[in-house]
Amino acid sequence: MRDAMVLKAQRFVNSVYGSRIGTTVQESGEADWATMYALTRALQYELGITALSDSFGPTTLGTLTAKYPELDADTVPSPDFCRILQSGLYCKGYDGGDLDGTYGTRVRAAVTRLKTDMGVEQVLPGTGLTPKLVKALLTRDAYVPAASGTGQVRAVQQWLNGRYLSRQDFYATACDGLVSRDTVKALLFGVQYELGMADGTANGTFGPGTQSGLKSHPVKQGDKGVFVQLFSAGMVLGRRPAALTDAFDSSLAAAVRAFQTFVALPATGEGDFATFASLLASFGDQSRPAKACDTIAKVTPARAASLKAAGIAYVGRYLTNPSATSLPEKAIQPGELAIIAQQGLRCFPIYQTVNNDASDFDYVAGRTAGYAAVNAARDHGFRRGARIFFAVDFDAIDAEITTNVLPHFKGIKEAMADSGHPYEIGVYGSREVCARVGAAGYSTASFVADLSAGFEGNAGHPLPRDWAYDQFAIRTLGSGDGQLDIDADIASGRDTGQGAFDRPRPAVPDVALDARQVPALRADLSRYMQSIGRPDAGGIGSDARLYTNAQAVAAIQDQDGLITELSTTYTMRKALIQTAVYWAMRDHDLAGQSTDRQVADHHLTGSGSVRDSHTGIGEISASDAIQAWNHCIGWGFATGEHRDPAKDADLWAVWQQLNKDNAFSVRTAALIHLWGTRGRPGGQLPPGDRVTTPRSMRLDLAEFEITELLRRYRAWDPDVESRTHQSMAVYQIFEKYNSIVRNA
């Protein structure tokens, strides 16, 4: 919201310091970080610091402390120095006077109110500003209640400031009533100080020293003192129905029992170490027994014995592997689910490809993930009703959850609906990710990445109400053949995986598509293409496409016999060919048709300005076709004569075949995929991540390999990355129906 005094502060810092500090701020009237940084640099300039920085760090604090241990009407060194302080007060919402450079009555009143709001008026009486208070002024932390803040949380924040601000490494925490990572860190500092840690040793992290000391300070009903205050503060920050108190009474004990039940701890009602640990760090007491785990190791009979000996009942395993070389056992291995069932364990499936950056998430990727996970789960033999946990394996901030993660899970949910709801949808991620995906209605249970205590989405966030698994420790189990590394998980019972499985669907060759499946295939493709803005009719005007959804499916089905033959000959999934051709047909537009006419004119009359174009139902250029054929003839994949793309006669002959002969285009599409595995411009796959054997492709390509082949197929397209991204869902839809008939 635009504020006249903040605007005045921005104009001041720009006019007086802009050239001196090397930056200016937008004069918006809003107290943003840019304004705070500029004021910080202005302060550094006034202090004589030459290496200016946005950070109010140790150098700034130390220099300010040495020169001005307390700033007031008698010690503020200059009017402009005072105006920096007044500007900081404006940005905090306090009346800093008229920006007149005078530490007058209104400034002193504002400082008094600031101290009261921060909870430090008793330990820092008077109207002066200490260096730590100046540092607090030049942040965006609020010291007045936020609209969604609570009085209980604010009381904790004020208590922490009032009790510990004098300690060396403790800085004022916000007093807005909102729980944040900084508030939790402030509480951890408090615990460490009360345990007797010295300044310089206390660091606000829940490390071994803190854990060891805390084990000696359990609290229970009837106890009083500072550790009860700290424990009750943890309950408040954990969003439990409690208030800051120094007396452990029956109401606090009841709230503790409810919390312990929720997080799957023994419901004793006492503030023991395990309970306190769960309030202070997302991973809690890492010595707790675990009933579940997730692992990238294949479960063999020997490893299953190690799991059972450790009390593990539920094992999370991955449906797919993002790489052919790294972590070779990450994906479920052949025969593994049978071993899990035989050994009396249960398995819950996890779907993760890359998923470690916001850019990996969007609606289209979600649709692809949904279809791919269903196909993979069926291949492995998971029965209807299993819950697949889709991974968000990075610390997504609030804005990224809104713009990337939620649309991604919307896509997953719609793909699951298109597939007939065979599986439940779960989410793996930080507490905030899990809570927001669940609240949006896109998941039915959460697998919480609490092991990542440093995640912004974990610190200060409560465990989601629908948590099924809580990942909290890394362990090595067993020895010899039975040794494996696991992430230990607490199980709530909301999900129990599956203990019996259907027969896995092996990587058998594709067969002819059953014509009875075509209407459903066409409908699935239609729904997906419409969801990404590609209407069935192909669009109108400049966006018009020449082939409708029905025409594209019909053309592909007309060539099904040939596509099946090519799939068998080259050990290539039909979906690779079908996807390339379908996408090419749905993408062919009026501009492409016009270019085709120019190619014909060039070769027939010499009037056309274009020598070659991407043409036919595969959108293949004659030059690419010739190179693909030459390549495959050389490898023995095809027979025929080598042609020269530099010769007009060869180019024109091949172009006409592509333009008029659908079967030739389809066969060439398959050869382009073979060319794409070795030799096609666009770069080779990483060493070892080959998609071929010496004379054929593989039926079990990983998703990253499929993506790379489809990308290389359209290497000529300036929008190749986007088109490939969108076409992956098409691949999974074709694969859905191909897998049905080949496994019938």
Image: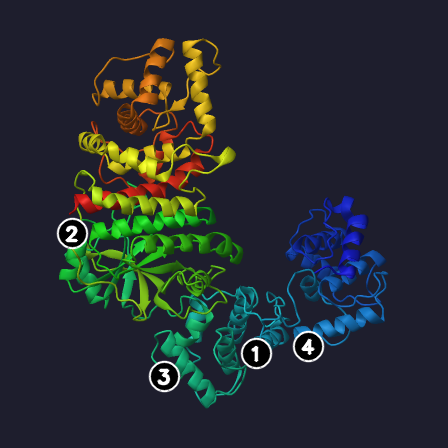
x and y, in percent, of residue 405 in the image:
45, 54
- Badge 1 or badge 3: first in the primary sequence: 1
Task: Name which of mark 4 and mark 2 comes first in the sequence.
Answer: 4
Task: Determine whether the residue tagged by mark 2 lies in a helix, strand or loop.
Answer: loop
Q: Which residue is mark 4?
A: 123
Q: Indicate whether 246 appears above or below 282.
A: below
Q: CA distance from mark 4 to mark 2?
A: 67 Å
Query: Nearer the observer, disc 3 or disc 2?
Result: 2
Amino acid type of the residue tagged 4 in the rendering: Val
Q: Are marks 1 and 3 in contact (CB under 8 Å)?
A: no
Checking the image for residue 268, the label placed there is 3
Task: Give amino acid for label 1.
Answer: Gln
| Residue 675, position as x, y percentages in the image | 30, 25
When asked about the image quadrant of residue 92, the answer is bottom right
Q: Position of residue 314 (x, y in %)?
A: 25, 64
Residues marked 4 and 3 touching at CB (< 8 Å): no
Residue that numbered label 1 is attached to:
152
N-terminal-most mark, 4 or 1: 4
